[in-house]
């Protein structure tokens, strides 16, 4: 029996207009829908979704947007850009590529940087070869829906031995519209052998915008390549955000993932890295801040599939008011993966008695010669530190803000790329009371 | 300047201070000695405003005001400074910015203008020289990874910059080498003036060779059981505390 929520999406599928291109994709699209129909939405009884109830999403009838829906004043667009950063910019408004606002500069030979819709016209082979390879619809309902309703997103291809100096910024801007809507951004990142690139995905919602972002990013990082990936989630506080990031890593490749999650009413971030060949390494660095009644869930999965692979993970959460944070970090060291080095830590700071954090490191180790460690904490601001600062004439609220920022800063400080670190610093500080004072400290 | 009457303080349900009386006038230096666990740090923390120390009886008057009504930050603004026995490490909070925020908060409260970056830097340079502290400690997180002696020196440095009216030094001399001890003494002596007062909690009379106190008190089991002059400290060093306790019990 299919639930009404599932029915809603099935019927939306048959009615969807102007859908994404390419006949070669229709089989995958159909299969994704079938898979979704069979499995439905995740329920709380599923281990992976134990703490996050998606019924608040599934009971809503979000509509698909059409191109041109939601106009945005120029100054609003300019305010979301990284003005201090010389980068290539792709801007999507309510899920659709806005070529007039995007700015793609000169690219090295062979580099492809396009919206998926355009890439489909000019590089169909490339797309056909990779799209859906790693982010398979069988992973779960939301990836299946993203595949079935795929409309646009970004395609990044960096050929072998090519270093893209300027970062790529992909903005997904959601605006206030008459009907609450859903978007399914889909990004495909392919880095050839020894290629290097920095990609920033930024999800931003205009205040009061009511929508659901269901994004999927798949990355292939070939031998010796390095991807620096940022996800900055600043959705509106009414919105829903479910984002999947999947990376396939070959020999000696490197992924640095930085995720900062600030917005959204209900948020789920999934990151999976498959360390599929020897020497591959990954760092997952993340900060989530939630307040009011925000709910933010981070699930990460690192598969150590081959020997001499390395993973490091640092996640921190700051939870205020009635907010709830979830962290689940799973590391699987497969039988073959001797000499694995895996470290993980998660720390949560509760700023209110009503805030809640659930943290669960999960280590599954099937090899014997490995180095693994993990640690998880949930705590409040340190009373002695507070007293020390107050005894130095710093007001209680300010002392609390300072200590909160100091806690969050540990994640921000792992970002080596200065313009982005500054930007994120600013965003995080902006979330705290006494921003001016903290800015002085951070300077 | 400070008058404590019949003070009772409870920590975690346990009575630590039990009827403590102490009067400190402006311009004076008082030394407080006493056995481990007698309540010296408790007294120091209560004066600085630690809230988990519950005052169950008695009064504390500071400059004609009820001190117990004030938050720790207001006390600091009113000129109280505690050099902690165990200064806490605060990762991620920059030492010198904290001090600048502290100084400007106090100045603002006292109706003075804030110091700008250059004025502040000049002041810092001057005081660094006074306490002979390494400049690189300034830009580290508060006390993080500081050696025991460096932490104490940092407290004295802060004191020198903030120029409190009532400074309470809780065993600032413990764990210091002889040179550092002299520096602490110089720091304290340079602060001495007619309108300031200093309370020194110490176990060693050697500090009192450098800072000559007006009065020496013995705190035992939550009360001041004996007060005297410098000679008392010498006698305590020689004979220990047992005789004071016996005297007190007999009384
Ligand atoms: N937070 C606390 N919880 C429980 N007991 C406490 C607490 N703080 C202090 N005490 C107790 O109060 C008593 C007095 O402690 P305090 O630190 O004031 O002693 P002190 O005189 O400073 O000793 P020392 O010379 O060793 O520094 C001790 O028995 C101590 O264990
Ligand atoms: Mg003590």
Image (spheres, coloured by chain):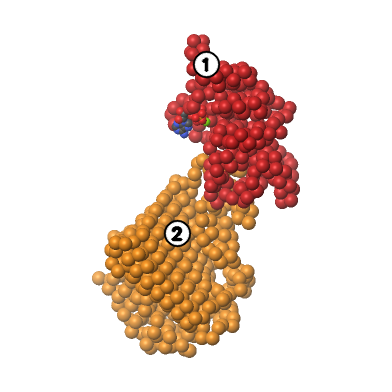
* Placement of the N terminus of chain B among the 4 image quadrants: top right
The answer to whether residue A35 of the structure is visible from this angle is yes
Task: Say which colour chain A has.
Answer: orange
Q: Which residue is mark 1?
A: B244
The x and y percentages for residue A184 are: 43, 74
The x and y percentages for residue A8 are: 35, 73
- In this rendering, the answer to whether B176 lies above or below A230 is above
The answer to whether residue B70 of the structure is visible from this angle is no
Tags 1 and 2 both on a single chain: no
In front here: A333 or A402? Answer: A333
Residue under the point 49% across and 85% down: A118
In front here: A158 or A179? Answer: A158
Task: Say which colour chain B has.
Answer: red
As drawn, the residue found furthest toward the front would be B178
Q: In the rendered structure, find residue A314 and report the number of the disc placed on it.
A: 2
- In this rendering, the answer to whether A239 lies above or below A221 is above
Disc 1 is placed on an element classified as helix
Residue under the point 59% across and 21% down: B233
The answer to which quarter of the image holds residue A42 is bottom left
As drawn, the residue found furthest toward the top would be B250
């Amino acid at each position: 029996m299919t639930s009404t929520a599932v029915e809603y999406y099935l019927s939306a599928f048959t009615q969807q207009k102007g859908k994404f291109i390419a006949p070669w994709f229709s089989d995958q699209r159909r299969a994704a829908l079938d898979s979704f129909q069979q499995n439905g939405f995740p329920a709380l009884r599923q281990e992976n979704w134990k703490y996050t109830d998606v019924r608040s999403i599934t009971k809503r009838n979000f509509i698909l947007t059409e191109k041109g829906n939601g106009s945005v004043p120029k100054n609003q667009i300019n305010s979301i850009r990284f003005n201090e950063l010389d980068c290539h910019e792709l801007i999507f408004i309510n899920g659709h590529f806005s070529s007039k606002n995007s700015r793609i500069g000169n690219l090295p030979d062979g580099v492809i940087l396009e919206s998926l819709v355009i890439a489909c016209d000019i590089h169909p082979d490339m797309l056909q070869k990779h799209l859906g390879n790693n982010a398979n619809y069988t992973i779960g309902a939301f990836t299946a829906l993203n595949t079935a309703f795929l409309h646009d997103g970004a395609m990044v291809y960096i050929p072998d031995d090519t270093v893209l100096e300027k970062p790529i910024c992909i903005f997904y801007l959601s605006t206030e519209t008459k009907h609450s809507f859903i978007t399914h951004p889909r990004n495909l990142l392919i880095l050839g052998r020894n290629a290097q690139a920095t990609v920033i995905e930024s999800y931003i919602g205009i205040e009061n915008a009511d929508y659901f972002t269901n994004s999927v990013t798949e990355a292939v990082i070939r031998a010796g390549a390095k991807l620096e990936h940022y996800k900055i989630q600043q959705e509106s506080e009414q919105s829903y955000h479910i984002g999947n990031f999947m990376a396939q890593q070959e020999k000696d490749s490197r992924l640095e993932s930085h995720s900062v999650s600030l917005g959204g009413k209900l948020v789920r971030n999934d990151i999976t890295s498959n360390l599929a060949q020897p020497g591959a390494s990954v760092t997952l660095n993340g900060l989530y801040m939630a307040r009011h009644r925000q709910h933010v869930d981070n699930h990460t999965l690192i598969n150590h599939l081959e020997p001499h692979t390395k993973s490091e993970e640092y996640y921190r959460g700051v939870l205020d008011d009635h907010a709830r944070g979830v962290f689940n970090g799973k590391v699987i060291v497969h039988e073959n993966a001797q000499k694995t080095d895996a470290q993980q830590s998660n720390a949560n700071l509760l700023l209110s008695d009503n805030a809640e954090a659930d943290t669960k490191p999960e280590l599954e180790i099937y090899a014997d010669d490995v180095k693994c460690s993990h640690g998880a904490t949930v705590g409040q601001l340190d009373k002695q530190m507070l007293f020390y600062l107050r005894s130095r004439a710093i007001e209680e609220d300010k002392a609390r803000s300072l200590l909160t920022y100091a806690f969050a800063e540990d994640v921000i400080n792992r970002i080596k790329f200065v313009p982005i670190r500054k930007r994120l610093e600013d965003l995080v500080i902006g979330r705290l009371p006494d921003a001016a004072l903290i800015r002085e400290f951070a300077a | 300047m400070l008058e404590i009457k019949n003070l009772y303080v409870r920590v975690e349900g346990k009575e630590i201070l039990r009827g403590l009386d102490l009067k400190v006038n402006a311009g004076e230096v008082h030394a407080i000695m006493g056995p481990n666990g007698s309540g010296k740090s408790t007294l120091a923390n209560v004066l600085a405003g630690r809230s988990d120390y519950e005052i169950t009886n008695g009064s504390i008057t500071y400059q004609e005001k009820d001190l117990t009504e004030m938050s720790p930050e207001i006390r600091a603004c009113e000129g109280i400074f505690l050099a902690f026995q165990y200064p806490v490490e605060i990762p991620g909070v920059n030492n010198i910015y904290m001090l600048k925020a502290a100084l400007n908060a106090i100045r603002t409260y006292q109706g003075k203008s804030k110091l700008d970056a250059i004025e502040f830097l000049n002041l810092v340079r001057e005081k660094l020289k006074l306490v002979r502290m390494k400049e690189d400690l300034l830009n580290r997180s508060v006390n993080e990874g500081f050696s025991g002696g460096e932490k104490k020196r940092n407290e004295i440095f802060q004191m020198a910059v903030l120029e409190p009216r009532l400074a309470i030094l809780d065993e600032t001399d413990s764990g210091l080498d002889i040179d550092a001890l002299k520096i602490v003494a110089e720091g304290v002596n340079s602060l001495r003036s007619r309108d300031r007062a200093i309370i020194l909690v110490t176990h060693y009379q050697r500090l009192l060779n450098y800072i000559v106190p007006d009065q020496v008190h013995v705190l035992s089991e939550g009360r001041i059981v004996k007060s005297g002059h410098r000679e008392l400290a010498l006698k305590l060093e020689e004979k220990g505390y047992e005789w004071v306790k016996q005297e007190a019990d007999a009384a």
